[in-house]
Image (cartoon, grey):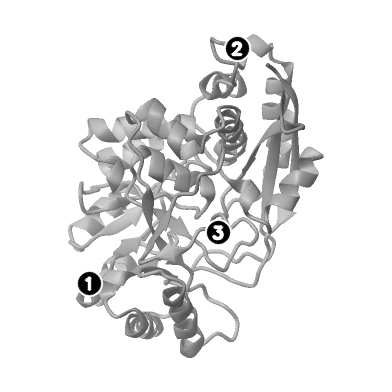
Amino acid sequence: MRIVDIRDTVVPIKSDIANAYIDFSKMTVSVVAVITDLVRDGKPIVGFGFNSNGRYAQQGLLRERFIPRLKEAKSVDLIDAAGTNLDPHKMWDVMMKNEKPGGHGERSVAVGIVDMAVWDAVAKIEDKPLYRLLAERYRGGEVDQTVSIYAAGGYYYPGKGLQGLKDEMRSYLDRGYTAVKMKVGGVPLAEDLKRIEAVIEVVGEGKNVAVDVNGRFDIEQAIAFGKAIKPYKLRWYEEVGDPLDYALQKELAEHYELPMATGENLFSMVDARNLIRYGGMRTGLDILQFDPALSYGLVEYLRTLDMLREYGFSPRDCTPHGGHQMALNIAAGLGLGGNESYPDVFRPFNGFADNIAVENGRVRMPDLPGIGFEAKKELYPHMKELAGL
C-alpha cells in the first residue's frame, strides 16, 4: 500500500465569544486528508484530521515542512512491517526529521493534525473504530463502552447576562449533561462570583461546575480567587496561571486543597513531565488536560501516558481538552478519566457523531470505522470536499 496524496485546507470557526485571555473573532482550523491507494466500496480509504480550538490553522507549517517530508519519503518508511497499513510511529519520525528539540508551540499542532489523520486511516484500513484498535494494541482489548463527559461553555459574550448564562447551562442539562464548565477571570471577582452562583443554582451543586481562568492570573490573583470560590467546592479550578509557570501551580496547591486542572497548553511529553515534576500536581485529585491534537498527536500522547505512570499517575487522571472525536476515542480505548465536550461552540468541529446521545453525563461509543467523522453531517462535507470524494 502507499499514500496517494496529502491535502490540507483552512476552515473558519470565528465567533463573538471570549475567555479571560482571547476572543475567537478570527479563529481558524486546519483540516488534513491522507489519501491512500486502498479502495473500499469503490472509494479510496482516507484519513482526516484537524487541530483543536484555541490554536489557529497551521497551513504554513504543514505545506512548508511536514506534508512535503511525508510525500518525499519512501513508502517503506511510512508503512508497517507487514506492508498492509500505515505506521503512525514511523510517519511521526519522518515528520520530525531535522527538527530540533524544544519549541513546542505551533509545530506540535501541525504534527498533531497529520497524526490524527493517520490514525483515522489506520483504523479504517483495519475496518475498526479507533477506540477498539487502541484498546487491542495498548490495553489488552479492554474498552470503556461509555465515556464521562462535561459540557464546556459559559464564555463571555456581548449582552449575555446572568439569565442568558443560566439558560445556556440549563440547555446542557436538558441534553443529558450533568457537569458543566464556565469561563472566569475576565471580569471583576465579585461579578464572576455572581456568575458562578447563578450556574450552581441551575446545576444543583458546586461539584458539577468547573471554572476555567485560561491562564490569566498571577499568584496573588490566583490565591485570592481560590479563597473566594473554596466554599462552593467546585469540580475543579482550571489553568489558573501561565501554563509554563510551574512554580505558580505548585504554590497555589499549598493554598487550594480542592481539585485543580491544567495541561491543555503543554505540547510535549517533556513539558508535561516538567508539570508533574515541578507543578505540585496531586495524583487522584487534580486533572491533567493534555490535548493529543495539539501536542504532536497520539504518538506523543502515548509517551506522555507512559511518563505519567512512572510518576504514579493513572490514565484516569487525564481528561483531555478539545472536545473532539479523536480525544473521545482515546479516552474509550486507553481508559482515560473522561473527555471535554462543546455542545454549541466551535462549529462544525465541536461535539461527536450525530447519533451519540448524552445520558446521565456519559456517551456510548459508536461502532464506526476510524474516528467517526463521517457520522457528523455538519463537519464531514468539509472533509469530503478536500479529499475529492
- Which residue is found at the position 57% from the left and 40% from the top? 109
Mark seen at residue 317: none
Residue 259 is situated, as x and y percent measured from the top left of the image, at: 24, 60
Viewer can see residue 111: yes
**Marks 3 and 2, how far apart at CA:** 35 Å
Residue 384 is situated, as x and y percent measured from the top left of the image, at: 75, 45
Residue 181 is situated, as x and y percent measured from the top left of the image, at: 40, 68
Mark seen at residue 233: 1
On screen, residue 77 above or below 325: above
Q: How crowded is mark 1: few (under 14 residues within 10 Å), some or many (20 or more)?
A: some
Mark 3 falls on what kind of element?
loop
**Marks 3 and 1, how far apart at CA:** 34 Å
- Label 3 or label 2, whichever lies nearer to me, is 3
Position of the N terminus by quadrant: top right
Q: Mark 2 points at which residue?
A: 83
- Which residue is found at the position 22% from the left and 34% from the top? 311
Residue type marked 1: Lys
Q: Are marks 1 and 2 in contact (CB under 8 Å)?
A: no
**Marks 1 and 2, how far apart at CA:** 54 Å
Q: Name the residue under label 3.
A: 355
Residue type marked 2: Gly
